[in-house]
Image: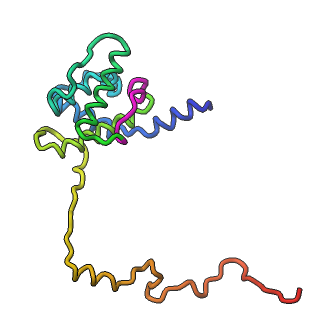
Amino acid sequence: MSLERAVRTKLAGKRNPDQEREAQEWLEAVLGRKFPAGVLYEDYIRDGQVLCEVMNKLQPGIVPKINSSGGQFKMMENINQFQQALKAYGVPDVDVFQTIDLWEKKDIAQVTTTLFALGRTTYRHADWKGPWLGPRPAEEHKRDFTEEQLRAGEGIIGLQAGQNKGATQAGQNIGAGRKILLGK
């Protein structure tokens, strides 16, 4: 098997049809329309127009111009505008897919992961009242301890310090014992 085919097989194995269906349903809910029947999820979002429309629904005007014609360069420009809008909306850089992942369908699983990151980010925008995608992100739970509580914790010896109710490695013999032969 060629290396390229092995890589493609591995990437295809990362895809999760349930997540892709969930992401598609979320996109449809945000847009207020269904994807065309018989068109694959990755094919419908490939030119970036749908993704830019979704960003404009989440935050109006975040993508100023969506290209609907003009060839490959213009369609890839849509994807780049979507990625810039994602970052401006608050999605971390590490969660954003590469343009080639979608345009050449190299890593659709990463595209779906990006959509889930976008769906999680919508929780942080109070002005968004529409549907969300994925679990709600954890929020900081700041705790304030008194000086007395902090001092009480200093006297506790953690299990990593070797005090585990007398448990030691004494008596364990793994393999042959070490033999010291004097005078030989």
Q: Is residue 155 above or below residue 91?
A: below
* Direction top: furthest residue: 70
Judge whether residue 95 is colored magenta. yes
Magenta region, residue range? 94-105
Q: How many labels does the image show?
A: 0
Q: Position of residue 153 (x, y in %)?
A: 30, 81
Q: Where is residue 142 in the image (x, y as percent from the top left)?
A: 21, 64
Q: Where is residue 66 in the image (x, y as percent from the top left)?
A: 24, 19
Determine the image quadrant of residue 62.
top left
* Direction right: furthest residue: 184
Query: Measuring 25% from the left and 45% from the top, which residue is drawn there?
Result: 134
Q: In which quarter of the image is the C terminus?
A: bottom right
Return the residue nearer the eye: 10 or 52. Answer: 52
Judge whether residue 126 is colored magenta. no
148 left or right of 46 in image: left
110 left or right of 36 in image: right
Q: In this view, does 15 lie above or below 140?
A: above
Determine the image quadrant of residue 105.
top left
Q: Which colour scheme is used?
A: rainbow
Q: Quadrant of the N terminus?
A: top right
Query: Measuring 22% from the left and 59% from the top, which residue is drawn there?
Result: 140
Query: Measuring 44% from the left and 40% from the top, which residue is drawn there?
Result: 14
Query: Measuring 27% from the left and 16% from the top, which residue is drawn there?
Result: 67
Return the residue nearer the eye: 11 or 92. Answer: 92
Q: Where is residue 7 in the image (x, y as percent from the top left)?
A: 53, 34
Determine the image quadrant of residue 68.
top left
